[in-house]
Image (cartoon, helix red, strand yellow):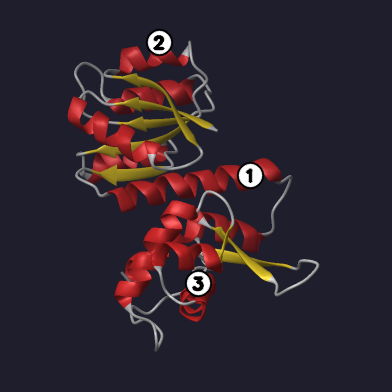
Amino acid sequence: MINVMIVEDDPMVAQINKRYLSKIDGFRLAATATSVDEAIGLLNEEEIQLILLDIFMPGKLGLELLAYLRKNDLETDVIIISAASDLERIKRALRYGIIDYLIKPFEFERFNTALTNYLEQTRFIDKQDSVSQQELDTLLLHRDEPVIAEDLPKGLAKDTLKQVWDAIQKLKKVPFSTDDIVNVVGISRVSARKYLNFLKDIGILEVKVIYGAVGRPVYQHEYNQFKEHLIKNFL
């Protein structure tokens, strides 16, 4: 679990950030601050791995917190969430080694991409002693992501895909079967399998075949949250 601190003086934006964060597995809101000085104080009390940082705040600017982190060699990552869109501030933030930069206003999809990419990188790095160039390119640049056309394969309908997708959102925390989808959506097993196979082909689902002592094999589907953004091209 990654401990997160939100540093934001606008209560409405802070609440949005909290709500968005609560939708993404793997993160825990450990602290909130409305100023740089308050954030520095909390860093001495809480173990924080990631800060969601605004730039424009009363008193010190968010960039001063970034400078403090680097000056003191604190191993705390930062994602900027700010209305500041001028290149000078963006370049300064990048020089301090931020993970990502979101310009207000933003949608959940962009927030989710920033957080899930960070989680994917963190988990990968924690498990590795060394990496190849190809692995590093995939991790940092996502070069292996396919270019996906917006048209669904023949025989699939957007409305039914939406129903299957909604059902998956209810079931995704544990592996689920084709019959689980059938029971929620109310379509045939043959139809359900077509949509699940499509989601497997674009990387959102991983499938394992479980063989019992008798009867047909059971297909267990596991959800890959790091690829879920690909569905937006089809819904």
- Relative side of 190 to 151, left or right: right
**Residue wearing tag 3:** 196
**Type of residue at label 3?**
Leu
- Relative side of 129 to 231, left or right: right
Q: Residue at x 33, y 78 (%)?
A: 150
Q: Residue at x 47, y 68 (%)?
A: 182
Label 3 neighbourhood size at 10 Å, few (<14), some (14-19), many (20+)? many
Q: Which mark is residue 41?
A: 2
Q: Residue at x 48, y 70 (%)?
A: 199
List x then y, in percent, for residue 33.
32, 19
The secondary element bearing badge 3 is classed as: helix
**Residue wearing tag 1:** 125
Q: Name above or below for residue 139 compared with residue 72.
A: below
Q: Earlier in the sequence, mark 2 or mark 1?
A: 2
> Real-space Cα distance between discs 2 and 1?
29 Å
**Type of residue at label 2?**
Gly
**Type of residue at label 1?**
Ile
> Real-space Cα distance between discs 3 and 1?
30 Å
